[in-house]
Image: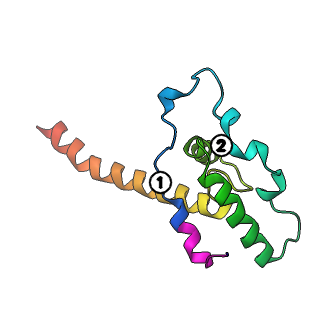
């Protein structure tokens, strides 16, 4: 069942991690446990000239796979830090990742601005 496009950003909230990190083999890379390793890669990356309805349906199916993945948080952070310009990573599309990155940048700027007056007061005191 397709959800309305605006509901995609609801998926952007970082969910609770299903498998505690301490229970994993710390020497193995996170992607060895990724559920998508067993699925068709085409589900996560758009073919050229894909119609909008087909893209939305494919992305929702990819997000369902991500939703049951024990390393979804690690995958998402990888895609945000790289940043990965294409595909569904960690339950987010490329457009959703751009929104998350913009929010993070805005938050960092606000924190820096908030810290400046405190720095000036401390320096003056």
Label 1: few (<14), some (14–19) or many (≥20) C-alpha neighbours in 10 Å: few
Q: Earlier in the sequence, mark 2 or mark 1?
A: 2
User: For residue 5, what is the image quadrant?
Assistant: bottom right
Label 2: few (<14), some (14–19) or many (≥20) C-alpha neighbours in 10 Å: few
User: Where is 25 relative to 96, above or below?
Assistant: above
User: For residue 96, what is the image quadrant?
Assistant: bottom right
User: For residue 60, what is the image quadrant?
Assistant: bottom right
Q: Residue at x 62, y 76 (%)?
A: 3
Residue found farthest to the right:
48
Q: SS of the residue at dot 1?
A: helix
- Relative placement, left or right, of 46 versus 33 is right
Mark seen at residue 82: 2
Mark seen at residue 104: 1
Residue 87 pos. (x, y %): 74, 56
Residue found farthest to the top:
27
- Front in this rendered view, residue 66 or 92: 66
Q: Which residues are magenta?
A: 2-9
- Relative placement, left or right, of 53 versus 107 is right
| Label 2 – label 1 distance at C-alpha | 14 Å
- Relative placement, left or right, of 45 versus 112 is right
- Counting labels gives 2
Q: Residue at x 19, y 37 (%)?
A: 123
Q: Residue at x 77, y 70 (%)?
A: 55
Residue 105 pos. (x, y %): 48, 54
Q: How is the image coloured?
A: rainbow
Mark seen at residue 121: none
Residue 92 pos. (x, y %): 62, 58
User: Where is 65 relative to 5, above or below?
Assistant: above
Q: Is residue 104 magenta?
A: no
Magenta stretch: helix, strand or loop mostly: helix
């Amino acid at each position: 069942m397709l959800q309305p496009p605006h509901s995609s950003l609801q998926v952007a909230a970082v969910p609770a991690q299903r498998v505690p990190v301490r229970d994993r083999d710390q020497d193995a890379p996170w992607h060895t446990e990724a559920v998508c390793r067993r699925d068709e890669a085409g589900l996560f990356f758009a073919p050229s000239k894909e119609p909008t309805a087909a893209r939305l349906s494919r992305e929702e199916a990819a997000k369902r796979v991500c939703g049951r993945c024990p390393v979804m948080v690690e995958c998402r952070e990888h895609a945000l830090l790289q940043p990965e310009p294409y595909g569904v990573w960690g339950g987010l599309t490329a457009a959703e990742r751009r929104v998350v990155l913009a929010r993070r940048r805005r938050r960092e700027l606000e924190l820096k601005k908030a810290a400046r007056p405190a720095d000036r007061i401390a320096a003056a005191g």
